[in-house]
Amino acid sequence: MNVVVVGMGYVGSVCSACFASRGHHVVGVDTSEFKVACIERGESPIVEKGLSELIATARREGRLNATTAIASAVPAADIVLVCVGTPSAEDGSLDLTHVKRACAEVGRALKGTGRFTTVVMRSTMLPGSVLSELTPVLEQACGGRAGVDFGVAYNPEFLREGTAVDDFFGADYTIVGAGCERSAAALRELYDGVGGELIVTAIPTAEMVKYVNNSFHALKVAFANEVGRLCKRESIDSHEVMRLVCRDTKLNISPVYLSPGFAFGGSCLPKDLRAIHSRSRHHGLELPVIGNVMRSNDLHVEEAVHLIERFRRRRLGFLGLSFKAGTDDLRESPILRVIGTLVGKGYGVLLHDPNIDMERVLGANRRFVEDEVPYLPERLRGDLDQVLAESEVVVVGNRSREYREIGPRLRSGQVLVDLVAAVDRSTVTAGEYHGLAW
Ligand SMILES: NC(=O)c1ccc[n+]([C@@H]2O[C@H](COP(=O)([O-])OP(=O)(O)OC[C@H]3O[C@@H](n4cnc5c(N)ncnc54)[C@H](O)[C@@H]3O)[C@@H](O)[C@H]2O)c1
């Protein structure tokens, strides 16, 4: 394919050389004459392992050129990859000035070519940037419509400096947010044989994945470093601890616990977080990531209360009281905090849980009910149908099997608030479905 790469910095020079090595014809564009001259001499404008060799070979074989003249490069392109910088503005917000300017130049160069070129943003930008801010710039500059006269896509860049070339060839997956099928097809052709599985999704999803990936990487670094600081105070080998943590690929390094749902609770996580936080304070040590996890969890409980109150209905039915399905352990179940708040505000509340039978709630669990949720016994109903019939808002609080299937049983006007992503929203035909964070 004929590929134009706008911006020959860390991202642009690596993808130019890598795509050229795959047999594509690449023209790199940059405003910096120095970078353009470097590429034209067959040298890398940046220090990056393996890049000099790739650029030298691509130049020798006539598949890589560079220029400062965007207007001459773009008209022959099947694909334009925009890789210019998106720095932080003074207030921390994202500065799209360079990328907007680059899009205006690309758009002007596309005007009247009669060719369907796909413009692919690779720079990191917040969700909404491509569709709301850059597509209009392109449309205005070229006088055409996205999806009709030219294509728009977002292809986030996941390469790490220092191992960027290896990352390019060994990627697990390539994410493509595509505005139309022709753009998706162009990117499939570009990546044919490299980049792992190519996954096509909506443009804002692709934009968001980039930020979530980087936030997650940053969170992991900060978390491991907090573990290290605490272990050092305790004279424990932090590397051995984290090696063992990472050895568990069932619960730790896995998708488990990484799906948006309701707040955590139960008899272990809150108690253990409090204990480790208290131990760190004893050392005079601040661990803001670990120490603020409970705060984040509390805010999620508050979010559930706000969502339920938003519907301004007084009769509420809660399905699922224990912190997860398949247990009758009510201790620190976060749904009880939601219920307690709403009972306190005078809402009419009925409760159901297939595993809770007051006759059989014993020991610490019984004491917890008597002390913390004294309203529970008189509001608990054994009959799910009765709770459904008498509630204006039905709140699903755990993933018990019978709750997953209540979608078709809702009546018109009834609201379902799903706190745990238990119910398939397409099965809710008569009522309204609302997820907590989805
Ligand atoms: N560096 C990384 O490892 C990395 C990884 C993933 C994503 N990103 C993202 O990719 C984008 C680019 O990052 P980078 O590190 O390559 O930036 P960079 O600053 O190294 O390179 C940007 C290049 O764009 C050029 N440029 C600016 N405006 C131009 C224009 N109108 N026409 C032509 N050239 C223009 C600049 O001269 C510069 O050479 C950013 O959004 C960044 O957040 C970077």
Image: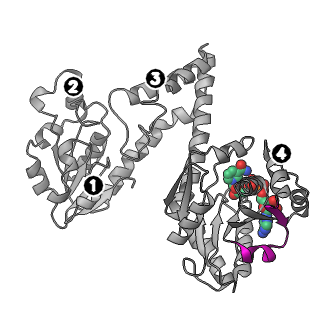
**Cβ(mark 2) to ligand 1 < 8 Å?**
no
Label 1, on which residue? Answer: 424
**Mark toward the viewer: 3 or 2:** 3
| Ligand 1's quadrant | bottom right
Query: For residue 134, what is the image quadrant?
Result: bottom right
The answer to whether marks 3 and 1 mark residues whose Cβ atoms lie closer than 8 Å is no
Q: Quadrant of the N terminus?
A: bottom right
Q: Earlier in the sequence, mark 1 or mark 2?
A: 2
Secondary structure at numbered mark 1: loop
Indicate the amino acid at tag 1: Asp
Q: Is residue 373 visible?
A: yes
Q: CA distance from mark 4 to mark 3?
A: 47 Å
Looking at the image, which is closer to me, 117 or 203?
A: 117
Indicate the amino acid at tag 4: Val
Q: Is residue 332 above or below residue 180?
A: above
Confirm whether the magenta stretch covers residue 76.
yes
Q: Which mark is residue 47?
A: 4
Secondary structure at numbered mark 4: loop
Label 2, on which residue? Answer: 367
Q: Earlier in the sequence, mark 1 or mark 4?
A: 4
Q: At which x and y percent is residue 277? A: 51, 26
Label 3, on which residue? Answer: 275
Q: CA distance from mark 3 to mark 2?
A: 22 Å
Indicate the amino acid at tag 3: Ala
Is 166 left, or right, of 308 in this rendering?
right
Q: Is residue 6 visible?
A: no
Q: At which x and y percent is residue 23? A: 71, 58
